[in-house]
Amino acid sequence: MEQRGAPLEIIARSLRRERDRVGLSLSELAKRAGIAKSTLSQLESGSGNPSVETLWALSVALDVPFSRLVEPVRPRVQVIRADEGPAVHSERADYVTKLLASCPPNARRDVYLISAEPGGRRESEPHGAGVVEHVVLCSGRARIGLTDEPVTIGPGDYVSYPGDVPHVFEALVAGTVACMISEHG
């Protein structure tokens, strides 16, 4: 199955739109997100290869859901096949997150499909204040939750934890897949 990344032109337009919305310069946004100004400039020009960590840092600095940076405009009736959807890879673990559904107006949640393989932990920095992550494991086994207190879950198990503190996702067997809902407070 071919993995496709989030289209760079969507990320570029989204970053410019959100940066303009909050009135930040390239330098100020890069500083707040903890990334190089040249990296942000490349992303806004539609080049570069953003990692999930970089996009999360930018979404926190812009105070917007991650989905607002990677999702194209979609019709109201939506079907995303298993090999479709904007996929973003981690640079620290064999971990891919695909946005399945972003927050509709007046809602505060995004839905993701996560595919992960053993051999590396996906450690996440805190997201925006009040974020809660809900995970249902579809296949495999994983250690998920707060960085200092992850729990091991299997297929069909559910775990919820605050996303505004450091947290982790670690696949324990090959073919681990989960559905995650990120609820914004």
Image (cartoon, grey):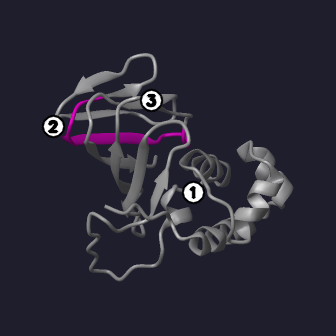
Q: Give the farthest residue toward the bottom.
A: 75
Q: Give the farthest residue toward the left.
A: 156
Mark carried by residue 155? 2
The one nearer the camera, 51 or 157, is 51
Mark carried by residue 64? 1
* Disc 2 to disc 1, C-alpha distance: 31 Å
Q: Nearer the viewer, mark 3 or mark 1?
A: 3
Q: In the picture shown, does residue 19 fall above or below 65?
A: below
For this view, does 154 lie left or right of residue 119? left
* Disc 3 to disc 2, C-alpha distance: 19 Å
For this view, does 145 lie left or right of residue 20? left
Q: Where in the figure is residue 124, as x and y percent of width and height?
A: 51, 35
Q: Can residue 21 be seen in this view?
A: no
Amino acid residing under circle 3: Arg
The mark nearer the N terminus, 2 or 1, is 1
Disc 3 and disc 1 in contact, CB within 8 angstroms: no
Which residue is rendered at x = 57% and y = 57% of the image? Answer: 64
Pointer 3 local density, CA inside 10 Å: few below 14, some 14–19, many at least 20: many
Q: In the picture shown, does residue 103 fall above or below 118?
A: below
Pointer 1 local density, CA inside 10 Å: few below 14, some 14–19, many at least 20: some
The one nearer the camera, 24 or 147, is 147
Q: Place residue 144 in its image quadrant.
A: top left
Which residue is rendered at x = 42% and y = 49% of the image? Answer: 96
Q: Give the farthest residue toward the front.
A: 1
Amino acid residing under circle 1: Val
Q: In the picture shown, does residue 67 fall above or below 174?
A: below
Which residue is rendered at x = 44% and y = 65% of the image? Answer: 4
Q: Quadrant of the N terminus?
A: bottom left
Amino acid residing under circle 2: Pro
To which residue does mark 3 refer? 121
